[in-house]
Amino acid sequence: GEDVEQSLFLSVREGDSSVINCTYTDSSSTYLYWYKQEPGAGLQLLTYIFSNMDMKQDQRLTVLLNKKDKHLSLRIADTQTGDSAIYFCAESTNSNSGYALNFGKGTSLLVTP
Amino acid sequence: DAGVIQSPRHEVTEMGQEVTLRCKPISGHDYLFWYRQTMMRGLELLIYFNNNVPIDDSGMPEDRFSAKMPNASFSTLKIQPSEPRDSAVYFCASSSLVLRSGYTTSNTGELFFGEGSRLTVL
């Protein structure tokens, strides 16, 4: 399938804000997602946004969606060392036969003290 | 629920050997996905099932790979014969989503992932 694009690495200092960007491909995606993967573990859903929304806020997390540009971002306020992980952007893809998620390659976030 | 359970967590094998990875999805979930994660290619969808039926296997790299889901609570991914380039972390995920274009749903389509099986082929 076509690629969901993300930058591969991001380094921030503890207490700063982190912004992870993503461009997706399927304009018909109903949901867009951010998953988090900690070392040695599987992916866990961090947050999601419905395609008819522009913004979603959940505690320290803010998701912005620009459907025109097919651009999704995740902002983490007051980033902590425990936020160090790989963050995956994903789009939902629909077909007559079924459904799947198309993931980006992931952005490795490193938070330094 | 214990979540998605995968086994083995780690496997080291020699080139040419058969490898079988196993997955138990969350009870009640009707979708099951197999993904492969490598540094170079990221997370790739290999195959997924709906109600035990394979829906899309276009991501399966070669005929050496096969996947089965004999019942709603068990799936296997088999590699025979294995090669060093198959070394990766293989994830199984399940979901209870029913999501179609043009439909609204309260289901967010979340995939629940297992902890993965790390395969090393020497």
Image: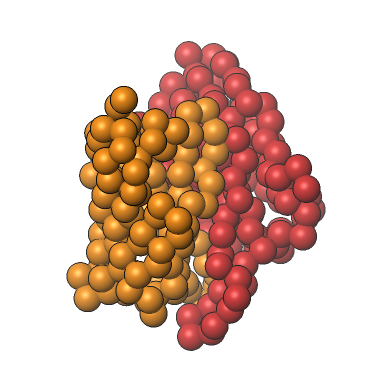
Q: Position of residue B98 (x, y in %)?
A: 62, 72
Q: Is residue B92 visible?
A: yes
Q: Nearer the viewer, residue B67 or A36?
A: A36
Q: Residue at x 57, y 55 (%)?
A: B111
Q: Is residue B114 above or below residue B85?
A: below
Quadrant position of residue B2? top right
Q: How is the image coloured?
A: by chain
Which percent across, then down, holds residue A69? 20, 70
Residue B106 falls left or right of residue A58: right
For chain A, give the colour: orange
Q: Quadrant of residue B28?
A: bottom right
Instruction: Please tell me which residue lies in front, A16 or B65.
Output: A16
Q: What residue do we see at 53% from left, 46% from top? A: A44
Name the spot of residue A95 as percent of width and height, x first. Answer: 48, 73
Q: Residue at x 60, y 71 (%)?
A: B107
- Identify which residue is drawn at 53% across, 78% down: B100
The image shows residue B58 at horizontal and vertical percentages of: 46, 55
Q: How many numbered circles does the render carry?
A: 0
Residue farthest left in this picture: A69
| Chain identity for the colour red used in the image | B
- Name the residue nearer the viewer: A63 or A6: A63
Please indicate, yes or no, whether residue A24 appears anywhere in the rendered image. no
Look at the picture and state if A11 lies above or below A102: above
Q: Is residue B79 above or below residue B54?
A: above
